[in-house]
Image: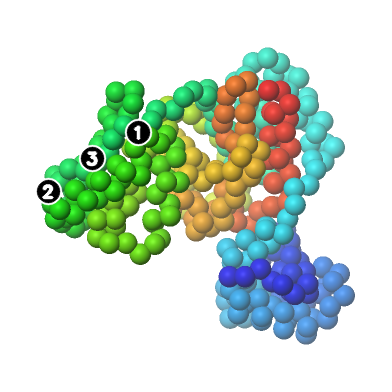
Amino acid sequence: MRTPVDERDRRVLQALIRIYVERREPVSSRMIEEEANLGIRSASIRNVLGRLEREGLVVKPHSSSGRIPTDEGYRAFVDQLLPGDLAREQEEAIDHALREAGEDLSQLLQAMARMLGRFSSNIAIMAGPKEKKESSLIDGVELHDRGAGHILLAVSLDSGKVRTELVDLKREVKPGILIAASSFLAERLTGHRLEDCRRQLEPYLTAEADEARSVATDVAQMGRGVFGPEQMLRITFEGIPEALEQPEFADPVRLKNLLELVARHELFEQALDEFVTGEVGQVSLAIGRENPLQALHPFTLMATRYELGGATGYLGVLGPRRMRYARTLALIHGIAAHLDRLS
């Protein structure tokens, strides 16, 4: 996938996405000509759409229909966006909600989640806050064969705790290979914080590897819960009834998978920990299959990390890929900025 470098291509893609977001139906060249005011004739727009389709940025859901954006098309569109400002109505509503909440931290965060859900028309996520503390350092890593392709991953911490997880590799591992894999993990992870383990192993995940390194990275990925945060965040979801009115939530299987995920806070927290990698206030965004969990593949997840009163948490939105990205991005930035001013 590439971002369109031709200005005309970019404008047509932007117009198609904006019309599709509003109308929820495939977009034709005539619709773009009539509604986008680009100064480009329908025949020229058709040529551009054909080019965008060959690039994998748009697709025809039916042979006789217009086109809709792909995940790659949304990504190309979003990467061109800059955070805007909150509308005056939104600023006033948020200020009022903050005054109503007063000094009660729980009420304040719930109020901000309600504002985010209300103005984005999506599911708002408020996770935390979790007080900062010195994270445990890894004191050692060992792998033990438990037979039938099962490997016990044991991680010793400097606090004296030992975390374990049984991983099913679905293949037998020779003793010498397992010893080498254990040494590989111990050398690269000992002395590092739990939350830094993914970063330490990331360069090895895609590179060509010998069998021992392959076993080591497979075990670490499948047993990543061992390297997770030491305490659970409190996660609040707001705006679910309103979001469920959108057609993307109508599929019963998709909805069931999503609601099951929402109910399992530990999985959602793990996804946020893996997904939000930027600094405080920097928004991370995953579209469709970019999402860390399969249940989220039909959706877009947008989130940032915030700090409040010496504690840290996550603020975000979960909604259809057919999302008002600029408005949602502005909301997350704006609410995170309000929370930052309270610190």
Q: Nearer the viewer, mark 2 or mark 3?
A: 3
Q: Residues within 10 Å of mark 1 (few under 14, many from 20)?
A: many
Q: Quadrant of the C terminus?
A: top right
Secondary structure found at label 3: strand
Residue shown at 70% from the left, 29% from the top: 340
Give the image location of residue 162, x and y in percent: 27, 29
Q: Residues within 10 Å of mark 3 (few under 14, many from 20)?
A: some
Q: Is residue 251 left or right of residue 20?
A: left
Secondary structure found at label 2: loop
Scheme of image coloration: rainbow
Q: Is residue 38 left or right of residue 141?
A: right
Three-letter code for the amino acid on which mark 3 is drawn: Glu
Residue matched to label 2 = 147
Q: Is residue 343 left or right of residue 260?
A: right
Quadrant of residue 54 in the image?
A: bottom right
Secondary structure found at label 1: strand
Give the image location of residue 117, x and y in percent: 65, 38
Residue matched to label 1 = 138
Where 171 sits versus 59, above or below?
above
Residue matched to label 3 = 142
